[in-house]
Image: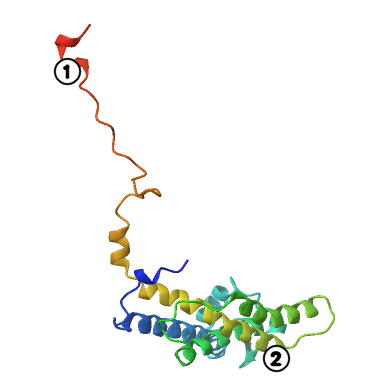
């Protein structure tokens, strides 16, 4: 859930944190692409240990089937063609994100656009899975890139919301106990009690 505008930093506040957030995302995306393409190059250059470690790391998120992967220097990419498209599309959209949306934008588009962007990928996968037609490296790459690019416009607003949120005021506002509709505290103070008879021996029976 996005924070209320009242919990955001003032409009005149510096864009340093959103800009820093965007730069970190871009750097992370480009680093992933370098690893995807650099792994087969490392293997070809005689660094099998490093390449094997990176292949194994990407193996947790991709099937890495050779027949469905791009090759360079006679070694396959660290991920399959569809995952390559997902990462490449996400990276491209992340790099160009400020050209299409403000870094202060914290509202994501309607979810229907994300589902529409995922439809070509789902259709391409389903047609190949049921043997209706053989999808290609190009179809996997393009459908993955489309979904990856559109996903940026749902991920970045959430990250920008976190970077613009005024955490200090949120913490100070969260210190008081909650109140009910009438404004009274939900956790009333303990009622005052009369002194126990054991504190006044003369009143004991």
Q: Would residue 98 be found to the left or right of residue 59 on screen?
A: left
Please say if 159 is above or below 84. above
**Front tag of 1 and 2:** 1
Q: Secondary structure at mark 2?
A: helix
Q: Residue furthest right?
A: 132
Residue at 42% of width from left, 77% of height from top? 160
Q: Which residue is mark 2?
A: 138
Q: CA distance from mark 1 to mark 2?
A: 87 Å
Question: How packed is label 1: few (under 14 Cα within 10 Å), some, or many (20 or more)?
Answer: few
Q: Which residue is mark 1?
A: 199
- Residue 6: percent from the left, percent from the top? 35, 70
Mark 1 or mark 2, earlier in chain: 2
Q: Secondary structure at mark 1?
A: helix
Camera-side residue: 141 or 60? 141
Q: Tell me the quadrant of the picture where the C terminus can be found.
A: top left
Residue at 50% of width from left, 80% of height from top? 50
- Residue 92: percent from the left, percent from the top? 53, 90
Figure quadrant of residue 56: bottom right
Inspect this view and state whether residue 152 appears: yes
- Residue 62: percent from the left, percent from the top? 62, 75
């Amino acid at each position: 859930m996005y924070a209320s505008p009242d919990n955001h930093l003032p409009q005149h506040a510096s864009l340093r944190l959103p800009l820093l957030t965007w730069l970190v995302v871009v750097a992370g995306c480009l680093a992933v692409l370098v690893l995807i393409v650099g792994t087969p190059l490392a293997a070809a250059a005689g660094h099998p240990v490093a390449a094997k470690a990176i292949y194994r790391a990407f193996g947790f998120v991709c099937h890495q089937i050779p027949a469905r992967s791009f090759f360079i220097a006679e070694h396959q990419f660290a991920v399959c063609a569809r995952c390559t498209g997902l990462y490449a599309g996400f990276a491209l959209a992340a790099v160009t994100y400020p050209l299409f949306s403000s870094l202060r934008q914290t509202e994501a588009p309607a979810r229907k656009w994300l589902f529409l962007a995922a439809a070509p990928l789902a259709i391409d996968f389903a047609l190949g899975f049921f043997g209706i037609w053989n999808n290609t490296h190009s179809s996997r790459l393009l459908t993955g890139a489309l979904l990856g690019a559109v996903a940026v416009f749902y991920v970045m607003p959430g990250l920008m919301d976190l970077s613009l949120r005024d955490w200090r005021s949120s913490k100070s506002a969260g210190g008081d106990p909650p109140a009910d509709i009438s404004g009274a505290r939900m956790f009333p103070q303990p009622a005052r009690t009369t002194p126990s008879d054991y504190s006044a021996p003369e009143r004991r029976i």
